[in-house]
Image: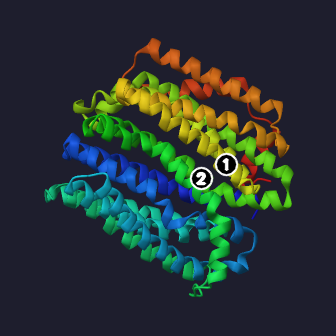
Amino acid sequence: MSQVRTIFKNMSWLFVSQIIAAVCGFVWTILIARYLDVSDYGIMNFAISFVGIIAITMDLGISTHIIRHIATDFDSAPKYLGNAIPLKSIFSFFTFFLALIILILMDCNELTIQITLLFTLEQIFKSMIGLFNGSLQAIEEGKYQAIGNILLNIILLIFILVSIIGDFGLYGITLAYLASNFFVLIFQYLAVKKRISKPNFEFDFQFCKKITLYSLPFALTGLLGMLLYSADMVMLTNMVGDYENGIYSAAYKLISVISLFYGVYSTVIFPVMSRYYKNEKKMLVVSFEKSIKYIMLIIVPISFSTMVYSSDIVTLFFGQKFYQTSSVLFILMWSLPLCFVNGTCQNVLNASHKEKYVTLTFLAATLFNIVLNFFIIPNYSYDGAAFTSILSEILLTISYFYPFYKLNIIPNKRLYWDLLKIVTASVILYFALLFLNLNMWLALPIGIIIYFTIIILMKPFDDDDKFIIKEILGKN
């Protein structure tokens, strides 16, 4: 099977799983937002954001390092996994008590501490799932990750429904997250045993020290990334209140669900890019160009369309009590194209062993984001936090120019013309939707027809794109 078809096969499995995840995610997001009051919703999202920030100490970048290594040396998998599992268990034990100490120092109330610690335990399960998924990604067995993802979301939705029907409150919702991840952890471990081998459990101190040191740049980038994308919610809670954080978090939830689809592509393409850097560097440039083009082809028109229907989207999914979220969504939606471009650049640099530069760029963007939020949030609340996110993404984009130039990864000029065509078609779509003033549900199919008609007329697809399509269809 060709590399293109293998990529498409894995993406197909993962896309199906993410569609199911997106549907389940939208349903439980609506159910939870309508069931909990705004303050409890803010507490839950504070807990998720807080745990997301400290969760990096559970992994320290080990999973990413293992993906890159196993992708180019399959035989090393049993030893890497056999040492990584006990090593991550030690890190997780440390993280749980670190969370407790920080929450006490922050003088959080008892409910917030208990909910956050439960989400910390849930994150420990997720961290181990991430290790097993990473190993399966490295050997391009996306099917098992997809099945695990489907199980996770269906089980979680069922448990959330039970919690709401039983009126178990915020505790019930939190335990639903915890239990569903535990079941999937067992499934993914069995999948690793079947497709790779049973891990050779040991604790080789020198080996663990070595992989930890190699993984640290990934860990620091992950930590800075969580700070960059989660610190605003923590700062909103502490600087203006739980209510404002609830308003902001609702928009962020919608953005996160859409981001899941980029996560599918990133999951599949990173091991491939790692192999291309080692064996076929010209293909690394091609994979970067095509990644940017295909991602922008989808996400740019979505962003323009959301500008038109932000109020309708928020009212549909969260109800009238979250009406203020529409302004946040209007602004924050524009972080997605930038975030996806930056994520693709990050994949290329990590595959090219330039992870230290990625860490430095995230450090600069995170410091910029936090410092600016200190001044913006007290005056402009959630809208200011959303605007700061856009500026931070722009800073990241600019910072990637230099390492790409040093690596001689210079996109073909045709890519810029194709991106211009995509933006032009999206702008026309935006004004067409404004002019027609259609109901959101009617605008969806009509908008798709308008956009792709314009795209086809502009002819952004070259011979390479046609070849890729034929490869996917098995006609080459």
Residue type, numbered disc 2 = Thr
Q: Earlier in the sequence, mark 1 or mark 2?
A: 2
Give percent across and percent down for residue 313.
36, 31
Question: Up-down: is 432 above or below 284?
Answer: above
Residue type, numbered disc 1 = Val
Camera-nearest residue between 235 and 452: 235
Give percent across and percent down for residue 352.
77, 55
Left or right for 104, reference 409: left
Looking at the rendered structure, the secondary structure element under dot 1 is helix
Q: Residue at x 58, y 17 (%)?
A: 428
Q: Which residue is mark 2?
A: 221
Q: Residue at x 20, y 56 (%)?
A: 111
Q: Which residue is mark 1?
A: 358
Question: Up-down: is 324 above or below 219?
Answer: above
How far apart are labels 1 and 2 at the CA level?
7 Å
Give percent across and percent down for residue 73.
75, 74
Q: Within 10 Å of the Cα at label 1, are there few (<14), some (14-19), or many (20+) other Cα atoms?
A: many
Question: What mark, if any, has residue 214 been given in the picture?
Answer: none
Camera-nearest residue between 276 and 235: 235
Camera-nearest residue between 340 and 214: 214
Question: Up-down: is 52 above or below 438?
Answer: below
Left or right for 436, reference 341: left
Q: How is the image coloured?
A: rainbow
Quick one: quadrant of the N terminus? bottom right
Please report contact status of discs 1 and 2: CB closer than 8 Å, yes or no.
yes
Give percent across and percent down for residue 237.
31, 40
Residue 64 seen in the current view: yes
Residue 445 seen in the current view: no
Looking at the rendered structure, the secondary structure element under dot 2 is helix
Q: Residue furthest left?
A: 167
Quick one: quadrant of the C terminus? bottom right
Q: Residue at x 30, y 27 (%)?
A: 324
